[in-house]
Amino acid sequence: MVSLAEVAVDGTKVRAQASRASFKTAAKLDRIEATVERRLAALKAEIETDPAASSRRQQAARRRAALDVKARAARARQALDKLRAEKAERAKEP
């Protein structure tokens, strides 16, 4: 499950229509800044108490990604085998 509590921007440029409602108010910006500060403080504390936590999290993410690729490849292989069997059956028919 992916949490949308935090969102990272990758630099992709997207055209959009900006309305008055889309601009942040000072109160909203204050809340965003406070949330970022709390998150940074938590990450700094984590690094101070357990420097390897970040690398373990990255390794776990890499492992999940590799398992996902493996599962997708297995599903693709099954689909390919099914298509080949169907094609062979059609070739047998007169």
Image (cartoon, grey):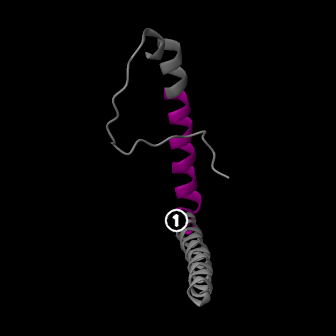
Label 1 is placed on what type of residue? Answer: Gln
**Residue 30, image x, y percentages:** 50, 20
Is residue 39 a member of the stretch shown in magenta? yes
- What residue do we see at 47% from left, 13% from top? 26
Q: Residue lying at the far front in this picture: please name it.
A: 94
Report x, y in % for residue 77: 57, 80
Q: Main secondary structure of the magenta part?
A: helix
Count all numbered tags in the image, as a single digit.
1
Q: Residues within 10 Å of mark 1 (few under 14, many from 20)?
A: few
Q: Is residue 87 above or below residue 15?
A: below
Residue occupied by mark 1: 58
Q: Residue furthest right?
A: 1
Q: Residue at x 61, y 81 (%)?
A: 86
Q: Position of residue 88 (x, y in %)?
A: 58, 87
Asked where in the image residue 87 lies, by quadrant, the reply is: bottom right
- Measured from the top left, where is residue 68 in percent x and y? 58, 70
Res. 42 image quadrant: top right
Nearer to us in this view, 25 or 91: 91
Please name whichever residue, 69 or 52, is drawn nearer the observer in this view of the structure: 69
Answer left or right for 84 relative to 12: right
Residue at the limit of the structure toward the bottom, as seen here: 92
Q: Quadrant of the C terminus?
A: bottom right
What residue is at 51 percent from the left and 35 percent from the top? 36
67 or 75: nearer the viewer: 75
Q: Which residues are magenta?
A: 33-56
**Element marked by disc 1:** helix
Q: Is residue 32 above or below residue 45?
A: above
Whether the magenta-drawn stretch holds residue 4 is answered as: no
